[in-house]
Image (tube, rainbow, N blue to C red):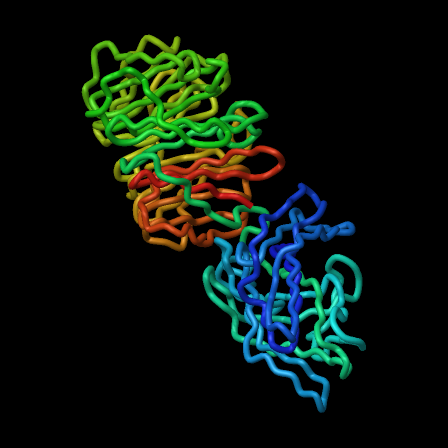
Amino acid sequence: MNRKLQLILAVTWLSTFAVGCADHEVTAPATVPGGGFTAAITCQATVSSGTLSCGDVTAAPTRGLNFEIVLGGQNEYVTLAGSNISYDAGTGIWEADVTVKNLTAQPMNTADGTTADTGGVKVFFHTAPHVTGGLGTVDVANADGTGLFLGSSEQFFRHSSGVVLDTGATSSPKPWQFTLSPGVTAFSFQVFVTTKLPADSSVLRWVSETPLTTQTLRSVRMNGGGGGGGGGGGTVTGWAVGDAGTILYYDGTSWSAVPTGLALSAIDLYGVDANGGGGGCNGVVYIVGTGGTIVYSGDGGCNWSLQSSTPPVTTALFSVSRVGGGSNSTAVFAVGAGGVILYSADGTTWGPLTSNTTDSLFITGGPGENDWFAAGQGGTGLHWNGLVWSPLTLNTTASIHSATGAGGDQNALTDIWLAGTGGAIVHSPDGVAWTVQPSGTTEDLFGIGASGQKDVFAVGSSGTIVHWNGVSWSAMASGTTADLQSVETSGGGGFLNVWAVGSGGTILHGVR
């Protein structure tokens, strides 16, 4: 499979005989879907004062760039650093040993997360070096080659050829040489960095949100923005629930705690399903937890009440899911400990369904009221045809904690993914045949979510995040050791957003 080169850095580096390129001012990227421009950093240095001043953000036009997105920001996605800087007046050679540090969530110079590419991490010149102090000329003396990146015949330096540059790793130093006329005292140039990534159209950074609670968050649900969380377009909103009755709401800008007026402090909440929410008091929210708890809002979280089944269920409910997912949806399923399955045809009145298992069920969902799934303890899988629950052969003994549909539509899923203990990933193209896939981790996986058939995320213990790019699973660096319990994707503004929640109130935001 051919992978496109992903542009990941734009930084302007202005150097003199005694100045390297470390400690540049960070500038947030300005990104435009499908092209546009990226913010660049201008650094100015003078030999006489021995100073380096960074700022003067400029816009670097992409001139027909064929990559999906352009990013900028020294010390945000990569750090270029120079050392052992020298100038030989006799030969006119200015030289610095330059390294590239990978600050993204993905390994660089690899298309699958494991196998190194021979192309390396290329640092290429967007603008040729030019004199900014003194008189004369400046030229690149030892470029590794020229290529077509943004314009034509752009020179580049190649780093980490044949070596995977993991997240947080720094490449071996490479000498960059420039030939100067005797009268040159300063020069500048603009560079970009391009490399292969396992998921070149997906998350590049995981940003940790400020915790609002120390309680473990068990489930997250996003709405709007055209993403995998259901709902229509527009502002992305969302819900996260967890232990001790914790309920959080995302209004498109920030998370906040939700007061319900209900006595929930002794109840751990495990699952949430919702559409809508926010200032309009529109949409429905279902939350389930210990003791058979069903928390309900019929007006987007403005007012709350408790629902119960007949006969009452007092065991824990782990997952809740509405049929169809739209604002007109009324049918709802909930599953829990000991094989409990509850069903509501009208969204209010609940009753039990015979599951024919005593294994705990941790997840439920499906494309239609007569085509529904549940899975859980010890690889138990069930399918509902509108009349009975029948066992599924999932070909695993791992406990399944999460599921997602990555393809098809509400009437016929064509891609179903399950995640479970021991790093288990189970895939089905049709809901009938199930195949176990190597995930590359043995950590327990508690959540899985997808924005498409080539963009699937699974999260788990010790901050584990693995990603499916349509060919293979590869690890992403989350930047946390918290146990991640749930993940979901959402769109908005042409960009992908991914949310993961977990222990200690952890909320991670995956962004481009």
Find residue 203 and report its horizontal and vertical position in percent: 52, 47
Q: Nearer the viewer, residue 29 or 146?
A: 29
Nearest the camera: 365 or 303? Answer: 303
User: For residue 266, which quarter of the picture?
Assistant: top left
Query: Residue 490: x, y in percent?
Result: 52, 33
User: Compared with residue 21, is residue 28 higher up or lower down, i.e. above or below?
Assistant: above
At horizontal 60% and vertical 55% (from top left) the residue drawn is 8
Query: In this rendering, would 407 be left or right of 336?
Result: right
**Residue at (33% x, 37% y) in the render:** 401
Q: Which x, y percent locates residue 120?
A: 60, 68
Q: Is residue 129 visible?
A: no
Q: Quadrant of residue 303?
A: top left
Residue 62 visible in the snapshot? yes
* Residue 370, above or below 418: above
The quadrant in which residue 213 appears is: top left
For residue 342, above or below residue 443: above
Q: Is residue 140 left or right of residue 10?
A: right
Label total for image: 0
Q: Who's the residue at 53% across and 63% down the image?
A: 23
- Residue 399 x %, y %: 29, 40
Q: Which residue occupies the foreground of this view, 99 or 400?
A: 99
Quadrant where the N terminus sits is bottom right
Residue lying farthest to the front in this orientation:
49
